[in-house]
Image (cartoon, helix red, strand yellow):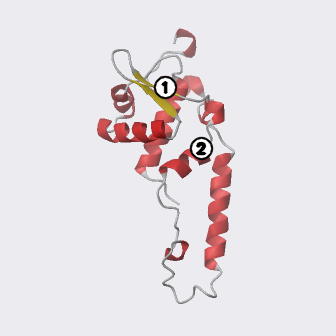
Amino acid sequence: MRLTLYTDLSLRLLMFLALDPPGQATIQTVADRYRVSRNHLMKVAQQLGQAGFIETVRGRGGGLRLRRPPAEITIGEVVRTTEEDFRMVACFGDEASCVLTPACRLRGALGEALAAYLGTLDRYTLADLTAAGPPMRLALGLPPAEAA
């Protein structure tokens, strides 16, 4: 299974915000640090805000911050929110166009694999992903935690 760039950006934005909790990061700052499109990141931030992962503050001194503690945000929850299509094969959808559909066991095996995949992601939180704080902060150009 391959995650979309959208989900990748969602996870990276949330990780940035988890690593820089006291401040309110701007879209531009995060885009610059990750070297990604500001426009794409704006769309990601909008959906993450609507889904309750982040809150946005407008105006001077505004920016983005997590709405919930990192330990309460599971990676599986983020992936389910940001991925549009988990159909691994056509028969996962409404269109049962395969002649094997009535007798096929592939759909069940792939469904089980998908459930295991998402179940594994549910065991990890944003806090788990950012536990290696100092090296990640350094890679993103953030000051050490004690100086933040």
State the image coordinates of residue 32 (x, y, percent, origin top left). Answer: 34, 29
Q: Label 2: few (<14), some or many (≥20) within 10 Å?
A: many
Q: Which mark is residue 75?
A: 2
Q: Which mark is residue 65?
A: 1
Q: Is residue 2 above or below residue 87?
A: above
Residue at (37% x, 23% y) in the render:
58
Residue at (46% x, 57% y) in the render:
84
Q: Is residue 24 above or below residue 16?
A: above
- When asked about the image quadrant of residue 63, the answer is top left
Residue 72 left/right relative to 84:
right
Q: For the image shown, how many numbered marks are present on the structure? A: 2
Residue at (48% x, 49% y) in the render:
82
Q: Amino acid at mark 1?
A: Arg
Q: Label 1: few (<14), some or many (≥20) within 10 Å?
A: many
> Which sits earlier in the primary sequence, circle 1 or circle 2?
1
Q: Cβ–Cβ below 8 Å for labels 1 and 2?
A: no
Helix, strand or loop at disc 2? helix
Residue at the far top: name it.
Answer: 147
State the image coordinates of residue 127 (x, y, percent, origin top left). Answer: 63, 32
- Please identify, in this view, whether the residue under mark 1 or under mark 2 is nearer the observer: 1
Q: Amino acid at mark 2?
A: Ile
Q: Is residue 136 above or below residue 111?
A: above
Q: Which mark is residue 34?
A: none
Residue at the far bottom: name it.
Answer: 99
Residue at (63% x, 48% y) in the render:
121
State the image coordinates of residue 9 (x, y, percent, origin top left). Answer: 43, 42
Helix, strand or loop at disc 1? strand
Front-most of residues 23 and 33: 23
